[in-house]
Image (cartoon, helix red, strand yellow):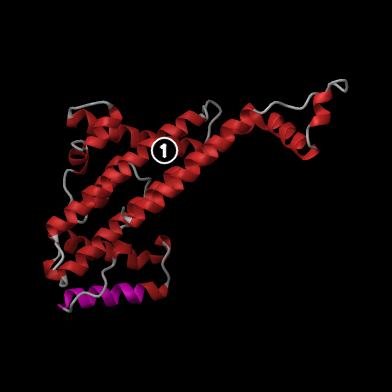
Amino acid sequence: MNPILADFFEDLSRVTKLLTLLENLSKAPAPSSDPQNTINDEINPEVAAILLTCHDAKVAFPILCGAMLLYLSGRFEYFARELFEDMCSEFSKNCKYYEKLPKELRENLVKFTALVIPDSRKYGHGDGAIKTFVHNLADNLGGKEISEINVQCLSVTNTNMRSDVLSDLFGRAGIKNLWETLGQQTALKAFFHEFAPQLVSKKAKDRLDELMQLRNKVAHPSGSFVWPAIEDIRQHVEFLKVLSSTLSEHCSLFATNVAPPV
């Protein structure tokens, strides 16, 4: 398994464990307030305090679900960028020279390096990074054998990782019709219980967009907002498992076909 995907799966597993913990805590009974109830005498004081706190905090448990959803959506965005950057780095290693990189990648290296350099701090880079970006691009365009390309510039986005943003991101390296291709994969078909690739693509895009829209609502809740339930988060976790593994496999195949190892 791709190490980037393995790390993502490990973090998804942590979310699942936290959801199980939260579910169990929500079912925990409160200690009895009846002094005649001898069950309190059988409970360790620390355990009794935990049970009482759980009982009092149950009404706020949905907020914890919301926090996990924020983490989940942000972690997927990080995974997507990592996967994209890794694929582009593999291109550079295998192609060795700038002119042998995919056309879209060559064009976007220039475009996004030029985008990041004037406003580098907005994208989390300091003065040292600017010098490195300029040096790398100059070497690439000058015909030197590639030692590094500016993948950190290539992967910048300004919005949440909605379906169109994900497609645009991987399109910068030359991957066309991303969702159409993903919709043909067996794992996503099985997840949605659909056979038609068009329907699978649409459902996958809609599910990812739903997650990102919910993320915005959690971050900026209104009075009418309904917080996600534990089962809602679990369903998003299962979807991201399938989507991430399918995306990782497609990137690996694309990299091998476009820029095979020499």
Q: Give percent across and percent down for residue 4.
A: 35, 55
Residue 37, how many percent across, how many down? 83, 21
The structure residue drawn at horizontal position 25% and vertical position 59%, both measured from the top left corner, is 87
Is residue 137 inside the magenta stretch?
Answer: yes
- In the picture shown, does residue 136 fall above or below 171? below
Nearest the viewer among 226 and 81 is: 81
Q: Magenta stretch: give its range.
A: 130-143
Question: Which residue is outermost to the front?
Answer: 42
Q: Is residue 219 above or below residue 196?
A: below
With 239 as the anchor, is 31 left or right in this view?
right
Q: Residue at x 45, y 30 (%)?
A: 232
What percent of the width, then of the height, locates residue 221?
53, 34
Looking at the rendered structure, the secondary structure element under dot 1 is: helix
Q: Nearer the viewer, residue 134 or 230?
A: 230
Question: Residue 69: x percent and y percent?
Answer: 48, 39
Q: Nearer the viewer, residue 167 or 236?
A: 236
Q: Is residue 43 left or right of residue 123?
A: right
Q: Toward which corner of the image does residue 2 lie, by quadrant?
A: bottom left
Quarter of the figure with the C terminus: bottom left
Q: Examine the rendered structure and indicate whether residue 221 appears above or below residue 83.
A: above
Magenta span main SS: helix
Q: Quadrant of residue 178?
A: top left
* Residue at x 66% of width, y 28% of height: 28
User: How many labels, in total?
Assistant: 1
Q: Is residue 165 left or right of residue 29?
A: left
Amino acid type at mark 1? Val
Q: Would residue 221 be seen by someone viewing this image from the given angle?
A: yes
Circle 1 is placed at which residue position?
A: 237
Residue placed at 41% from the left, 32% from the top?
Answer: 235
- Tell whether position 177 is magenta: no
Q: Quadrant of residue 191?
A: top left
